[in-house]
Image (tube, rainbow, N blue to C red):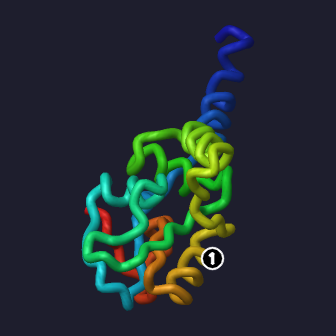
Amino acid sequence: MKPHTRFLAPLMFLAAVSAPAYADVVVVVSSKSAVATLTAEQISDLFLGKAATFPGGAAATPIDQAEGAAPREEFYTKVVGKSATQVKAYWSKLIFSGKGQPPKEVADNAAVKKQLADNPGAIGYIDKSAVDGTVKVVNP
């Protein structure tokens, strides 16, 4: 056995452990909300400021997780089709031109659920494992 090969297994293990672990992210509204389902396009429009209401006409308030949070990156990549960096650049341009404000940011899954409890018109995203009776999953 060559001396460098005995280090390969531990290095591979460390690489696997340090890789980002993404849980499934789901889009949620308050359990009191009349909204039942939304398409990825409708969700994207709400989080990019292209729409301000749910399909039925009720006002929608998107809630983002903190910049750098794993659920945020997964949400924007999978649902919106943009990286968090692209979304930041998008909002920077709109803010600079005075054409919009990004969604309110909160710290984590628990903070998103609290915002939804306080505002039935809010929409956010959380790890699937954090879903409970206070929220309703609306993405297919």
Please identify the quarter of the rendering in which residue 103 is found: bottom right
User: What residue is disc 1 on?
Assistant: 111
Closer to the camera in the image, 107 or 1: 107
Give coordinates of residue 15: x percent, y percent: 63, 34
Up-down: is 85 above or below 46? above
Question: Can you see residue 14?
Answer: yes
- 99 to the left or right of 57: right
Residue at 36% across, 85% down: 33
Give coordinates of residue 19: x percent, y percent: 60, 40
Up-down: is 48 above or below 128? above
Up-down: is 43 above or below 76? below
Up-down: is 20 above or below 114? above
- 53 to the left or right of 77: left
> In the rendered image, which quarter contains the N terminus?
top right
Residue at 26% across, 76% down: 56
Question: Can you see residue 17?
Answer: no
> In the rendered image, which quarter contains the C terminus?
bottom left
Closer to the camera in the image, 70 or 82: 82
- 88 to the left or right of 54: right
**Badge 1 element:** helix
Residue at 27% across, 70% down: 55
- Label count reads 1
Closer to the camera in the image, 61 or 127: 61
**Outermost residue toward the top?**
2
Q: Amino acid at mark 1?
A: Ala
**Outermost residue toward the front?**
98
Q: Mark 1: few, some, or many residues within 10 Å (few <14, many ≥20)?
A: some
Give coordinates of residue 4: x percent, y percent: 72, 13
Give coordinates of residue 128: x percent, y percent: 43, 67
Residue at 42% across, 66% down: 52
